């Protein structure tokens, strides 16, 4: 498989290009038919090619989906404990750079959608009464910034961190009486919007840094609340 991947790179093939037929690959790579078939099957399982049968069939290069990447990372982390402090340490690095990257790239439609998500993250501004639905609006705000990012790697890291929060932290830390979280998200995102409308990357970077720092403090407080409540619930009679 590594030989085919190397050949794809060296021949400057792009997404949408068709690979040579099986016989041609065998000749070019100098390997057995079974090796080529096994390699193609692996590449298809990884989402790097799709295959079609028939006279005009064969393998076509495709871009693996984000969901496939998320699944691989989730499986890798399946038996690992996610530490909130470490998670937010990563967010403090990447999210400010994301905000600076998109500050001058966001379209009017992007800005409008971001504005609507701010309201949905707060119960007094159109948001749901359900904690996790409000947190989803918060995370979607950050997802939309990743969608507008010009750096695929930066966007990927930010999306992965958001989804780790979705899967591990948001539900675990559901806090129906924890209004400070709603307030921080609403005001932090609103301040960011001012920088985005002004097309000010440096201001956006600094505001995102402050926002993530405050969100971290509140996430850690929420974790302590959950732990304390768990201890009380599990205490012997």
Image (cartoon, grey):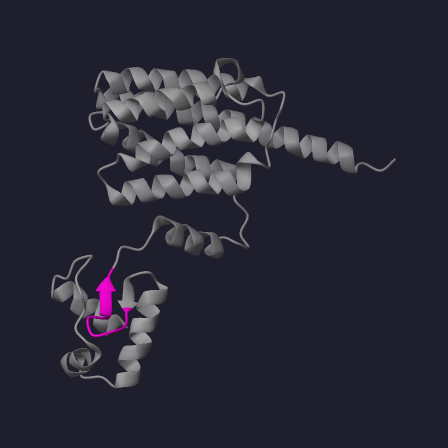
In the rendering, at what x and y percent does residue 97 appear? Answer: 28, 32
What range of the chain is rendered magenta?
Answer: 52-61
In the picture as drawn, the residue positioned furthest to the left comes out as: 11
Residue at 46% from the left image edge and 56% from the top image edge: 76
Q: State which quadrant residue 192 falls in.
A: top left
Residue at 23% from the left image edge and 31% from the top image edge: 101
- Tell whether 198 sits left or right of 81: left
Q: State which quadrant residue 103 falls in.
A: top left
Depth order, front residue of 46/211: 46
Depth order, front residue of 121/157: 121
187 vs 72: above or below? above
Depth order, front residue of 8/94: 8
Magenta segment: does it hold 202?
no
- Tell whether 14 sits left or right of 193: left
In the rendering, at what x and y percent does residue 93 appear? Answer: 34, 35
In the picture as drawn, the residue positioned furthest to the front comes out as: 55
In the rendering, at what x and y percent does residue 16 appear? Answer: 19, 58
- Tell whether 68 sits left or right of 168: left
Residue at 17% from the left image edge and 79% from the top image edge: 29
Residue at 25% from the left image edge and 58% from the top image edge: 62
């Amino acid at each position: 498989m590594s030989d085919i991947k190397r050949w794809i790179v060296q021949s400057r093939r792009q997404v949408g290009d068709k690979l040579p037929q099986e016989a041609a690959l065998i000749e070019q790579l100098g390997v057995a038919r079974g090796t080529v078939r096994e390699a193609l099957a692996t590449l298809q399982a990884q989402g790097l090619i799709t295959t079609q049968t028939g006279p005009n069939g064969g393998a076509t290069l495709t871009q693996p989906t984000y969901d496939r990447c998320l699944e691989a990372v989730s499986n890798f982390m399946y038996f690992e404990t996610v530490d909130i402090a470490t998670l937010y340490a990563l967010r403090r690095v990447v999210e400010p750079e994301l905000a600076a990257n998109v500050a001058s790239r966001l379209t009017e439609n992007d800005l409008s959608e971001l504005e609507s998500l701010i309201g949905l993250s707060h119960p007094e501004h159109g948001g749901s009464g359900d904690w996790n639905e409000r947190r989803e609006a918060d995370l979607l705000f950050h997802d939309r910034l990743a969608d507008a990012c010009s750096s695929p790697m930066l966007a990927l890291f930010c999306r992965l961190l958001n989804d780790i929060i979705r899967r591990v932290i948001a539900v675990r830390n559901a806090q129906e009486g924890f209004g400070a979280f709603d307030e921080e998200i609403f005001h932090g995102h609103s301040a960011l919007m001012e920088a985005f409308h002004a097309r000010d990357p440096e201001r956006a970077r600094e505001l995102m840094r402050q926002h993530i720092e405050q969100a971290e403090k509140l996430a850690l407080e929420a974790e302590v609340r959950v732990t304390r409540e768990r201890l009380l619930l599990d205490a012997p009679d």
